[in-house]
Image: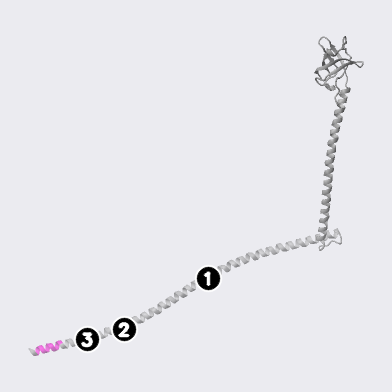
Amino acid sequence: MKAIAYVVAILILGGAAYFTLEHSRKFGELEKVRLDTIASNKAVSANADAKETDRRKAEEELTAAQKSREELTAALESLNATAATLAAEAANLDRTIKAQDAEFAELNKTLEQVSAMLQGLGEDITLENLPDKIQQLEDDRTARQEKLQELEGLVASAEKALATKRDEIDRLVRRETQRTARIGRNAMEAVVTAVNQDWGFLVIGAGSNSGFSPQTPMLVQRDGRLVARITPSAIEPTQTIAEIDFKSMAAGARIQPGDRVILAKPAAN
């Protein structure tokens, strides 16, 4: 039994050793695999780091390239805008030059005309002394203008004095006309054409056309002697009806047709 136990024990020990060796071999293989895996992981990690570094560098280069592209695009757009502006300015400049050429041509034409005109004005007038001549003409014009204003002032004063004289003459003429009219009225005579002693009125053969006015005292004369005083009561254009003042009549006197009628109070001259 002991032998069997020893055999079993030996077998067990042998199995254990075998398993131990096998396990050790497998562990060695696993450790190698693990180490290889670690080394591989390190290599992969290093490669990944390198790739990340390359990726970051590539991204930086890409960002720089994009930025450079954007800058180049902006610069190109600016250059295109500048080119368009320069083209427009060039076109404007061409138009300006053409316009200036036309103006120069017109100016030369004008200069030729001015030269021809200057030749007509006199040999001593040139473009060089033209400003002095113009100033001389301007001075002459100013002097003539001042002289004209002085003459206009004298004329205005003379016209004012003449107007004053005319007003005075008109006043004197009106005064003389009125005086003549008054004298005419003073010398005016009319004839009694009818008499009504009972009603105390008479008819005179002159009226407003002869200058008679209402309430103007009049005298009736015969052969230069006073017959009576009368007062107009109704005046028509060609005849006058007057009331007789019997108190002014001499005793037994009577007004008769044909007696003369004059103003009782001559108008003042």
Q: Quadrant of residue 242?
A: top right
User: Which amino acid is tagged 2?
Assistant: Asp
Which quadrant, please, contains the C terminus?
top right
Q: Quadrant of residue 183?
A: top right
Instruction: Determine whether the residue tagged by mark 1 lies in a helix, strand or loop.
Output: helix
Instruction: Determine whether the residue tagged by mark 2 lies in a helix, strand or loop.
Output: helix
In x, y percent, where is residue 127? 81, 62
Image position of 137 with respect to 245: above or below: below
Residue at (56, 69) in percent of width and height: 76
Circle number at residue 227:
none
Q: Residues within 10 Å of mark 2 (few under 14, many from 20)?
A: few
Circle number at residue 36:
2
Question: Is 70 positioned to the left or the right of 32 in the image?
Answer: right
In terms of sequence position, does the residue under pointer 3 or pointer 2 come before the other?
Answer: 3
| Magenta span | 3-12
Circle number at residue 71:
1
Magenta stretch containing residue 204, yes or no?
no
Whether the residues at callouts 3 and 2 have beta carbons within 8 Å, the answer is: no
Per the model, the C-alpha gap separating discs 3 and 2 is 20 Å
Which residue in the structure is indicated by mark 3?
22
Magenta stretch containing residue 11, yes or no?
yes
Instruction: Determine whether the residue tagged by mark 3 lies in a helix, strand or loop.
Output: helix
In x, y percent, where is residue 52? 40, 77
Image position of 62 with respect to 102: above or below: below
User: Which amino acid is tagged 3?
Assistant: Glu
Whether the residues at callouts 1 and 2 have beta carbons within 8 Å, the answer is: no
In terms of sequence position, does the residue under pointer 1 or pointer 3 come before the other?
Answer: 3
